[in-house]
Amino acid sequence: MNSYLSFLTLGLGLFATACGATSMRCDGLGCDDGNACTAESCNPQTGLCQSTPVSDGTSCRLDTGIGACEAGVCTAVPCVRPGGCGFPTMGSVEVALQVAPASPAEVLLEATCAGWVITARFFIQEDGSWRLAGPIPSGACTGQFVANDEAGKTLCTSEITFDVDPSAPTQIDTQMACPIAAP
C-alpha cells in the first residue's frame, strides 16, 4: 500500500507538472492591471494573476495631481504646496552658460520654480559652453548653478533668480566664475 501511495503521489506530481501547474504556467503572462497602487504577480499554483496593495503612502498620479496609495487605491492628498498641488503650467528655458577658468565634468541647475523643486543637467557644447533647454514650471525661480568635478565634488556655485513665462521661451545667457582647484 505504501508503494502504491508513493507511486500515486509521484504520478500526480508528474501529471501536475505536465499539465503546467508549475511556474511554467506563468511564462508570458502579463499581469499588470494598470493600477499603480497594486503589485501584480502570477500565482504558479493557479496560473492566474494576483494583485496585492503596495505600501500605503506610495505616490501615484491622479487626473487632478499627485496622490498617495491607501489600501491599493490612489487617493488625493491634502495640498501643502504654496502654488497649489495640481500640475504646473509649463514654460521653457534656454540657458547658455560659460564656466571659466575651470573645466567641470558636469553642471546642474538646482532651483525652485513656483513651489516646484527641479534639478536639470546641462550639456557641454563644442565651443566649451554649457547649454540647458527644456520644459520648466512657469513662474518665479530661485536657485543655483552647480559645477562638479569628475568625482562629483562641487567646484563652485552661482546663485540665480529668473522668471519663466509660459508664452515664450526664457533666454538666459550668463557666466560663472569657477576657480581652478590647486592640485
Image (cartoon, grey):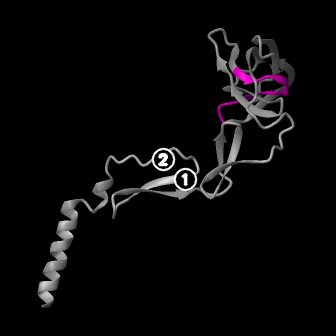
Q: Quadrant of residue 20?
A: bottom left
Q: Nearer the viewer, residue 43 or 143?
A: 43
Q: Is residue 12 above or below residue 163?
A: below
Q: Quadrant of residue 15?
A: bottom left
Residue 115 locus on image (x, y percent): 83, 34
The residue tagged 1 is 38
Mark 2 secondary-structure assignment: loop
Kind of residue indicated by mark 1? Thr
The reply to whether the C-beta atoms of the residues labelled 1 and 2 are less than 8 Å apart is yes
Q: Nearer the viewer, residue 175 or 118?
A: 118
Judge from the rendering whether residue 152 lies leftward or rightward of residue 18; answer left or right. Answer: right
Q: Nearer the viewer, residue 177 or 54?
A: 54
Give the number of marks.
2
The region drawn magenta spans 135-151
Q: Residue at x 72, y 36 (%)?
A: 153
The residue tagged 2 is 33
Residue 24 locus on image (x, y percent): 28, 55
Kind of residue indicated by mark 2? Asp
Q: Main secondary structure of the magenta part?
A: strand
Earlier in the chain: of badge 1 and badge 2, it is: 2
Task: Name the outermost residue toward the bottom.
Answer: 1
Residue 150 among those drawn in magenta: yes
For the N terminus, the image quarter is bottom left
